[in-house]
Image (cartoon, helix red, strand yellow):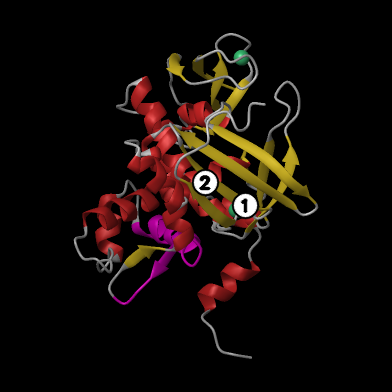
Amino acid sequence: MAPRSDASENRERMTPEEAFSILGNELRVEILRELATEARTEETVAGGPGLTFSQLYERVDATNSSRFSYHLQKLTDTFVRETETGYKLTYAGDKIVRTILAGTYHERPEFEPIELDGLCPSCHETTLRATYEDEMLVVRCAQCELRLLSFLLSPAQTKNRTPTGIMDSADRYVRDEYSMVLDGVCSECLGRMTNTIRPGQEPVGGIYLSVHSCEQCGYRVTAPVELCLVYHPAVVAFYWEHGTDIRDESLWKLFEYIHSDRWRTECLSSDPYEFRVTMTVGDDELRVEVDETLSVTSVRAVETRIINDETS
Ligand SMILES: [Zn+2]
Ligand SMILES: [Zn+2]
């Protein structure tokens, strides 16, 4: 058997329950915060020397050094590592302290409802409303109240931002997140994600959804199959040539493309799934085909559309 460090062996033997029970102490959480603060002020790219035992002891509110030493020892290997130059956070310590500083465990996000321009795929109302409900940021149709989008909302995300700024941050995050998800990478744990296609349910029939699931942590992301096209260079170029940067359109504005005549989606096959999406701007068309993994298999530009060829 290959030799490995005691630290990694200890961590491997530990259950999640044991790991989390280590954190149930104020002084230990304070130690993690101080190490995070130090890591933030260090200017070296590769990480600085960390804090020595005495430097760390001076920064926390411990009654005596043996009590401090006992609690530091409890954290060591799991959340803190001892290096030649000082104590530093482990990957697990870094993750946990960041969620503590972001307020994830002890604060609630605050959000005032706002109205947005978009398109309801069910009743075609163009005013949508964003509210905070069931721990999620939810976008509904202002008319029929159909739930169109839901985002995770963190307490840190709502600090020092207006409702519009919060919506922009949610949109930005989901755009980048979905780009990872399309490449099979979970945005929560970086585990492998795979997708399945299923038809949308009433009241929004005639659409197809891609459901992406992480094999490791179970995180799920659901989106209309057409959303993947916003990331394709041919689609970006097509809209760019017509004066629109489609990468700048918010997710709720994209409903105006996906659920209107601008984009027509045909299901070419359901086993395996295959789709053709025809995009129209003026007299120009772009036809893009995608397979069930949402990979683009064909792109065809039609320079001048023959007017009325599809209406008879
Ligand atoms: Zn509606
Ligand atoms: Zn995951």
Give me the disc on residue 94: none
Residue in the picture at 49% in, 35% down: 280
Q: Residues within 10 Å of mark 1 (few under 14, many from 20)?
A: many
Secondary structure category for the residue under label 2: helix
Give the quadrant of the C terminus: top right
Name the kind of residue labelled 1 in the image.
Val
Return the residue found at the far bottom: 1
Q: Residues within 10 Å of mark 2 (few under 14, many from 20)?
A: some
The span picked out in magenta is 65-84
Q: Is residue 149 above or below residue 18?
A: above
Secondary structure category for the residue under label 1: strand
**Residue 103 magenta:** no
- Looking at the picture, how far across and down is residue 308, in whole percent? 57, 28
- Per the model, the C-alpha gap separating discs 2 and 1 is 9 Å
Task: Kindly check if marks 2 and 1 are in contact, taking CB atoms under 8 A apart as contact.
Answer: yes
- Looking at the picture, how far across and down is residue 162, in whole percent? 33, 21
Q: Nearer the viewer, residue 225 or 264?
A: 264
Residue in the picture at 21% in, 54% down: 41
For residue 22, say whether it is visible.
Answer: no
Quarter of the image where one finds residue 48: bottom left
Name the kind of residue labelled 2 in the image.
Leu
Return the residue found at the far left: 43
Q: Is residue 225 above or below residue 167?
A: below
User: Which residue position is annotated with label 2?
Assistant: 229
User: Which residue position is annotated with label 1?
Assistant: 290
